Every structure is written in C-alpha cells, then in structure tokens.
Amino acid sequence: MNTVTIITKKRDGKRLTKDEIEYLVKGYTEGTIPDYQMSAFLMAVYFSGMDREETIALTQCMKESGDVVDLSKICGVKVDKHSTGGVGDKTTLIVGPVAAACGVPVAKMSGRGLGFTGGTVDKLEAIPGFQTAMAEADFISQVNNEGIAVIGQTGDIAPADKKIYALRDVTATVENLSLITSSIMSKKLAAGSDAILLDVKCGSGAFMKTEEDARQLAELMVDIGEGSGKKTMAMITDMSQPLGCAVGNALEVMEAIDVLKGGGPEDIRVLSIALAGAMIYLGGKAKDPEEGKALAEQAIANGRALEKFKIFVAGQGGDPEITEDYGLLPQSKIRMPFLAREEGYIQSIDAMTIGLASQHTGAGRETKQDEIDLSAGIVLHKKAGDQVKKGDAVCTIYGSDVKKTEKALEEIQNAVKIGLERPELPALIKTIIER
Ligand code: URA
C-alpha cells in the first residue's frame, strides 16, 4: 500500500477501503507516516468527505489503536453522557449525581478544557482536595459502592485520535462531520459503557453552527454507536448563548450545586433534567425519557441528588462542605462588571465570544501546558430576551490579573447585542434522535 496513492484517491473524491484507512491510521499512530502526509490526507477528507462505511472504518481503527476499558465489574447498565462541547456546560456535575441517585451507575471519564470550551475535569479540580486520578480498582469500587465516580482519562484511550486531533487543530481540519464523528465515537466506544447519550450542541459556541449540521452529526454518531452494539441516543441543544449564567471552573461548580438544590438558571435546570431523564431511561430505570425526567425532578426535590453529589465529592477526596459554603471554593480578587450602554432587550449573548473572553481571564487554556485560574471566569446577570436599563450590570468578570480581566471586558462589548424589540429565542432542546 502507498500513502500518496491513498491521499490522491481521497483528493479525487474516491471511496477508501477499510484496509487503506487502517494502513493510514496505524502508520500515523506508529510514526511511519509523517505529519505532512497526514495533514494532506485530512485536508482531502475535509473537502471530499467520507461516506458512512469509511467513517465506521475510521472510528473502529481509532478505537482499536489503544486500550478498551472493561467496566464489566460494575453492576448495572453503565450510561455515558457526552457533550460535543460548549460554553458554561456544567451538566455532567448535575446529571451524574441525579442519575446515580436514581440507580444508574455513573462511571465516567472526562476531559480537560481547551480553547473556548471548558472541561469537566478542570471544573471538578476547583473543589478543594478533589482527585480526578484514581486507580482502576478504586474507580470500580467507588461506582459499585457509591454509584458514581468521574475521573480524567486513564490508560491509552484512542491514541490515534490524540495524535490526529492535535494535527487537525493546527491544520484547520476540525470541522468535518466524519472526522468529528470518528474522533468522539472512537473514544466513547473505547470507554466501556453499555449505552451512550450524546448532547450535540449547535449555535455560535459549538462546532456545528446550524441545526442541520448538528442533525447530520448526531445521526451519524447515533448510527455508529448503534452499529457498534451500544444503545445510543442524541439530543440537539442550543449553544447560541452560554448555558446557565456561570462560565469558569469554580463559578460553574457553584451553579451546578444551585441546580442540585432545586435552583439555578432555567436553561441549565431544564437541560440537566432532560439529559438525566434520558440517562435514567437508557440505564433501564424508567420506561421512557419522560418518566426518567419525572424521576430526575423528584431526586432534586427530595435532596437525594445533592446528597449523592456530596458522597461523590467526598469519595474522591473533595470537601463536601462546599455545598454549604461556596467561600471554600477558589475566589477571585478582581471583579469587573460590564454595564449596559443602552436600554432595551438583550438580543443575543454570543457564546463563542463569552467562551473566549472567559478563557482570556485565565479560566481556560490556549495550549495544553497552560495553568488555569480556577477562580476566574464570567457570570451573566442577564440572558438573551431579558430587559435591561442603561447602566444595569449585564455580567461580571472574575479574575486575578487586572490586564487579563480588562482584556476580557473589552471583548465582551462585542458579545452582547441590545435592541428595542423582545427577540424570538431559539429552542433549547431542538430534537431527540433515537433509532
Ligand atoms: N470533540 C472531540 O473529541 N473531537 C472532535 O473532533 C470534536 C470535538
């Protein structure tokens, strides 16, 4: 087999065989195919696309490039939830304890944030003492005993994806349906769960800007999950403005606890209950997602979900007292409000711009090596559709460095649009895809 021939075939819009895809993925992972040839191949895929069979083959090869986690020692139906990435998305911190409180074992591996999207591992590490690294035996026993554990990725899950994703990031080849699908699903299929719930974001703060693109991605991912023998469901949800009000690690932990206490902003509460309901259904504890939602609501209302969160935090070395005293979480020295310069209705709060501004406060990384400021970020006091008067605080920026905080404040000027008419808001949950 010859690498140039395979690149040429894809450049000319032809279909590749499973063997050709395997040859490329294996060769690149092992280092016999150099970055420049893989870059050319990825750009050819970007322009020529891949069909379903090619995408399935690429996903399988990437999954098989590393460890496949064995969760069979955990009793019950293990359901993994994955979000394609967004701004202010702290749903794992909420739906994990809610699903666990309803009897669904949650054995989850999560990632760190990069760029304008946050990561669950960073958010959890804002909790004093919380350990996101755990020996496999401890992980399994915490899930069997307490019902929930969330750790950073262990072992060598889909190393081909790690290498290819890093290359896509610097060669402008991230936004391709087959490449995104194979990247996400190779890791999900290797993570060992029995069922998968996908939260596919669409809007300015998501990879997929339009509902149609998000639908195509969701359908392909569901097909690949189902084709690999795992019950898979997807929800297409809005990411045109940040989810909830808090963006930034410790700030998001506080908001997640508010939701577990029955409060918090409406959008994050509604989405978390819908996702938890779907997890409870996929985990076999409800006859349909609607019944799952009712069980999720009950678990929040009767305090069992918050209790489960405390047990989960304590089980991983964290201080459960944070639920009663947010002052125990990292606190920023600097707080700068952004004030409305005119009156009217908030037309939109651009998720991507807020995500980037939050990253620039120190809450996110630009490179994998960057240290993050766990206390930094942005809290919105108004959301799209809200009425404002001139001088009202639209949001507050939290940070530890005056220059960074001022830069974020400047960027936010472009994120918030105010107009005279009350705007039509996009639906939060657009479609549910289940085969
Ligand atoms: N998340 C991933 O893991 N991979 C992608 O390609 C996009 C989002």
Image: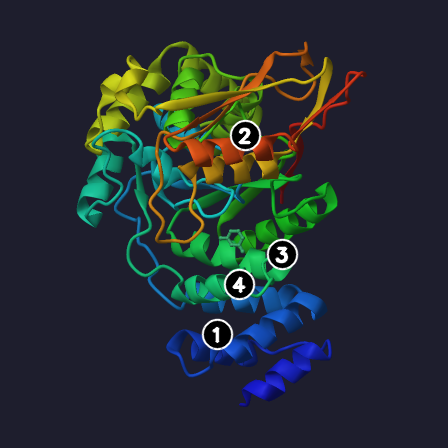
Asked if the residue at tag 1 contacts the one at tag 2, i.e. Cβ–Cβ closer than 8 Å, the answer is no
Q: Nearer the viewer, mark 1 or mark 3?
A: 3
**Could you tell me if residue 227 is visible in this image?**
yes
Q: Which mark is residue 271?
A: none
State which tag comes first along the sequence, 1 or 4: 1
Residue with the most extreme bottom position = 1
For residue 360, side relative to residue 316 (left or right):
right
Q: For this rendering, which residue is in front, 284 or 97?
A: 97
Amino acid type assigned to the residue bearing label 3 in the image: Glu
Which residue in the structure is indicated by mark 1?
Answer: 25
Amino acid type assigned to the residue bearing label 2 in the image: Leu
Q: Which mark is residue 175?
A: 3
The secondary element bearing badge 4 is classed as loop
State which tag comes first along the sequence, 4 or 2: 4
Q: Nearer the viewer, mark 2 or mark 1?
A: 2
The secondary element bearing badge 3 is classed as loop
Up/down of 246 relative to 10, above or below: above
Task: Please identify the quarter of the rendering in which residue 102 is found.
Answer: top left
Up/down of 256 relative to 351, above or below: above
Instruction: Kindly report the distance in space between the C-alpha atoms of the residues bearing marks 4 and 2.
Output: 28 Å
Instruction: Kindly report the distance in space between the C-alpha atoms of the residues bearing marks 1 and 4.
Output: 18 Å
At x 47%, y 59%, the residue is: 186
Asked if the residue at tag 4 contacts the one at tag 1, i.e. Cβ–Cβ closer than 8 Å, the answer is no
Up/down of 399 relative to 367, above or below: above
Q: Nearer the viewer, mark 4 or mark 2?
A: 2
Amino acid type assigned to the residue bearing label 1 in the image: Val
- From the image, which quarter does the C terminus lie in? top right
Which residue in the structure is indicated by mark 2?
Answer: 409
At x 54%, y 68%, the residue is: 58
> Ligand 1: does it lie within 8 Å of the C-beta at label 4?
no
Q: Position of residue 409 (x, y in %)?
A: 54, 30
